[in-house]
């Protein structure tokens, strides 16, 4: 083959590759980047829920924006379940629905470590909140609080988490993420063919016996994160978790501050009673273990009890269908119970 024919053949192949890539991207894959995290990880397209997002007019204060001269009713410390955006923002719900002045603190550690940063930096003495709300997603509690004693002295540097504007990976006709996303999409489809229970290595799919979502055609489908099943191999050390939380509660109580802790229920655990084929998996013992603790010195808000009661009433879209996180409905249900401990019963 002559050099000219080789170049023409290579050019033709590249053109064909780009045309097919563009067709796949714009025809199927791109939509995934505007939907939930499970959809992105599982390369799974879903219909829009009938439940609308909400938009709060008022917003809480981030630690990075705090002047130091303000006072707040509550400080919130947690992971992505605490730090959603707009209607998915737990602190914004407290601000708009209950009129609380909320300071949200995000640093670079897990929630208890970040609380100890606030303690060591003197922020708690300056702000003097009525309560600190500490949160962790259920699947991370063992790793964050159950493996060892969390020492106050290990968390001294107050470096606030700075939300960085994500690069516009969807810009242009040939977006930077297109090829990688297309390849992942193809891989996930092949993976799902051989492992029907999973959409990808990160995402499981199963069926429910009731319509708990409002996405047309997918009302009885549950997709969930693979780490929701970690409880099968990494059991909760409830004694260690309780000891860590009690230690923190004592330090706050000495300053006249109440510690409120809640674990954001894993999606799989929440919908477990309604899964048709449980594959012989036992129920996660996390919340039953917490209910049996008798020596708590902090307030424990049982999110599972609150959300399961709502499911029994037939409430839909407590968690978003294509996302690991709860919706504004789930947030509001938990906040309704939690604020009782701030205002007093």
Image (spheres, rainbow, N blue to C red):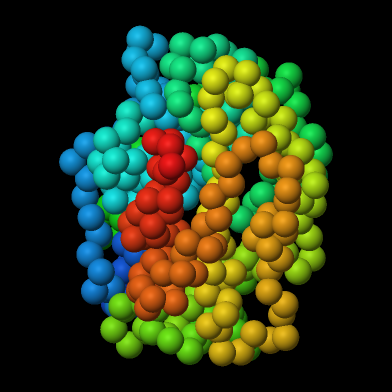
* Picture residue at 72% right of the left edge, 86% below the top: 280
Query: Which residue is farthest front?
Result: 345
State which quarter of the image contains the C terminus.
top left
Residue appearing at x 34%, y 64% in the figure: 35
> Camera-side residue: 211 or 255?
255
Q: Nearer the viewer, residue 294 or 334?
A: 294
Residue shown at 70% from the left, 35% from the top: 246
Q: Residue furthest left?
A: 57
Indicate the position of residue 33 as horizontal and vertical percent values. 36, 62
Counting from the top left corner in percent of width and height, residue 293 is at: 73, 51
Residue 55 visible (yes or no): yes
| 170, above or below 110, in the image | below
Is 296 on the left or on the right of 312, as rendered? right
Provide residue 311's location: percent of width, then percent of height. Answer: 43, 74
Please state the horizontal and vertical placement of residue 58, each as a whole percent of the image. 22, 37
- Residue 324 can be seen, yes or no: no
Q: Splitting the image into 4 quarters, where does residue 198 fall?
A: bottom right
Q: Nearer the viewer, residue 237 or 206?
A: 237
The structure residue drawn at horizontal position 75% and vertical position 26%, both measured from the top left corner, is 151
Relative horizontal placement of residue 304, taking residue 249 as reference (left or right): left
């Amino acid at each position: 083959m002559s050099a000219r024919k080789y170049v023409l053949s290579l050019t033709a192949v590249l053109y064909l590759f780009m045309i097919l890539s563009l067709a796949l991207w714009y025809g199927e894959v791109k939509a995934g980047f505007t939907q939930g995290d499970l959809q992105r990880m599982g390369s799974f397209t879903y219909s829009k829920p009938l439940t609308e997002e909400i938009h709060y007019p008022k917003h809480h204060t981030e630690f990075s924006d705090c002047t130091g001269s303000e006072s707040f009713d509550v400080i919130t410390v947690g992971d992505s379940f605490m730090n959603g955006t707009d209607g998915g923002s737990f602190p914004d719900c407290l601000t708009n629905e209950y009129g609380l002045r909320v300071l949200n603190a995000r640093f670079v550690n897990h929630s208890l470590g970040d609380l100890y940063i606030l303690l060591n930096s003197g922020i708690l003495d300056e702000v003097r909140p009525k309560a600190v709300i500490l949160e962790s997603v259920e699947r991370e509690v063992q790793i964050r609080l159950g493996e060892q004693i969390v020492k106050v002295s290990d968390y001294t540097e107050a470096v606030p988490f700075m939300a960085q504007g994500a690069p516009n990976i969807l810009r242009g006709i040939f977006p930077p993420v297109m090829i990688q996303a297309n390849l992942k999409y193809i891989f996930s489809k092949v993976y799902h063919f051989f492992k029907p229970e999973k959409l990808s290595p990160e995402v499981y799919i199963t069926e429910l016996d009731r319509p708990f979502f409002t996405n047309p055609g997918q009302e009885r489908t549950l997709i969930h994160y693979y780490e929701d099943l970690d409880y099968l191999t990494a059991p909760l050390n409830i004694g260690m978790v309780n000891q860590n939380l009690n230690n923190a509660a004592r330090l706050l109580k000495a300053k006249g501050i109440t510690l409120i802790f809640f674990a954001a229920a894993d999606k799989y655990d929440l919908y477990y009673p309604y899964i048709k084929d449980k594959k012989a998996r036992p129920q996660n013992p996390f919340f039953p273990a917490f209910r049996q603790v008798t020596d708590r010195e902090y307030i424990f808000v049982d999110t599972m009890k609150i959300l399961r009661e709502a499911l029994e009433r037939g409430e839909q879209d407590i968690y978003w269908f294509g996302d690991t996180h709860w919706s504004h409905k789930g947030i509001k249900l938990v906040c309704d119970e939690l604020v009782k401990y701030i205002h007093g019963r």
